Amino acid sequence: MHLVERAKDMMVATGAEWVLWLLLALSIGSIAIIIERVLKLRSLRVDIDELRTVLTDALRQGGFEKAREAMLPYAHPAAKVVLRGMRLDESDTTPKQADEAMTAEGIAQRRNLEKRFNFLATLGANAPFIGLFGTVVGILQAFEALGASSAAEAASAVAPQAVMSSIAEALVATAVGLAVAIPAVFAYNMFQRTVKSAIDDAQVLSLELLSYMSGKQAKNRSEAERADESEGRRSRTSMVGASPASKSPLSLECPA
């Protein structure tokens, strides 16, 4: 029981005011992160259909070189992912190499976009409990004050009113905790949805690039096969034309 008494005395002595200051500091940090992330994620406001059309048109017109020029002005993660897949010359890049490069860039872009999300998630999950802790400390203070009052004061109507007033003040900590947690959770969910949408857009452009590369590779293979077939026909024709005429049996000379 001594340990319980010491813990109670310590909480009563410190009070719940420090909990409110802690929640205020966490709230300021949360608001700063939300503002910073909003400014960062503004670059994601791009029409993906327009970006997709720009990419496909550039690939058809000039291959990798034209597509790189078309994607450079965009700050959207999807454009950066596709640029990573086209970092080498078109003739030196296979679809597998481009896919692996774009997958790695997609992971890097997601990590960059999700910076400080863990703080918002942790704050949203734990701020109500921090506020509840302040409320518990405040209620302990109220009952400690009630227990220290005299019997005459306890029997009067003043003591219960004072206790209820203290409890009401203690509940402020819980309210503040909820007020800190709700914006953090809301912002976290919105940001996560925005990042997921951006990564999906990057996947769309990646598939467009891989489709172009696969089609170009199949076209080159078909042209090579046709060229080999044509060369083979020419070789067979020249061999037939160069072979000596066969002698007729009637032209054979009789022995003397």
Image (cartoon, helix red, strand yellow):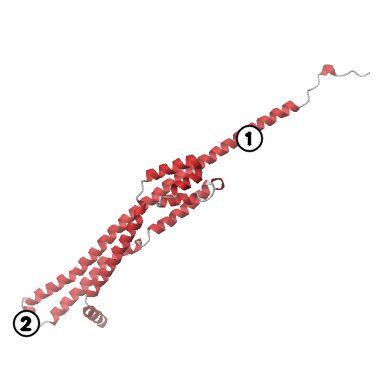
Circle 1/circle 2 CB separation < 8 Å? no
Residue 245 drawn above or below residue 227? above
Q: Residue at x 46, y 54 (%)?
A: 105
Q: Amino acid at mark 1?
A: Asp
**In the displayed structure, does residue 109 sit left or right of residue 255?**
left
Residue at the (28%, 61%) spot, across then down: 184
Percent position of residue 35, x then y: 31, 60
Residue drawn 46% across the image and 52% down it: 103
Please tell me whether mark 1 sits on a helix, a strand or a loop. Answer: helix
Residue under numbered circle 2: 152
Q: Earlier in the sequence, mark 1 or mark 2?
A: 2
Binning the other alpha carbons within 10 Å of mark 2 as few (below 14), some (14 to 19) or many (20 upward) gives: few
- Figure quadrant of residue 146: bottom left
Quarter of the image containing the C terminus?
A: top right
Q: Which mark is residue 25?
A: none
Specify the amino acid type for callout 2: Ala
Dividing the image into 4 quarters, which one contains the N terminus? bottom left
Q: Is residue 185 above or below residue 26?
A: above
For residue 228, which numbered disc appears in the image? 1
Q: Secondary structure at mark 2?
A: helix
| Number of numbered labels in the structure image | 2
- Residue lying furthest right: 256
Residue at left offset 44%, top offset 57%: 108
- Position in image of residue 191 (x %, y %): 33, 56
- The picture quadrant where one finds residue 139 is bottom left
Q: Position of residue 229 (x, y in %)?
A: 63, 33
**Mark 1 Cα shell of 10 Å, populated few (<14), some (14-19), many (≥20):** few
Q: Nearer the viewer, residue 223 or 163?
A: 223
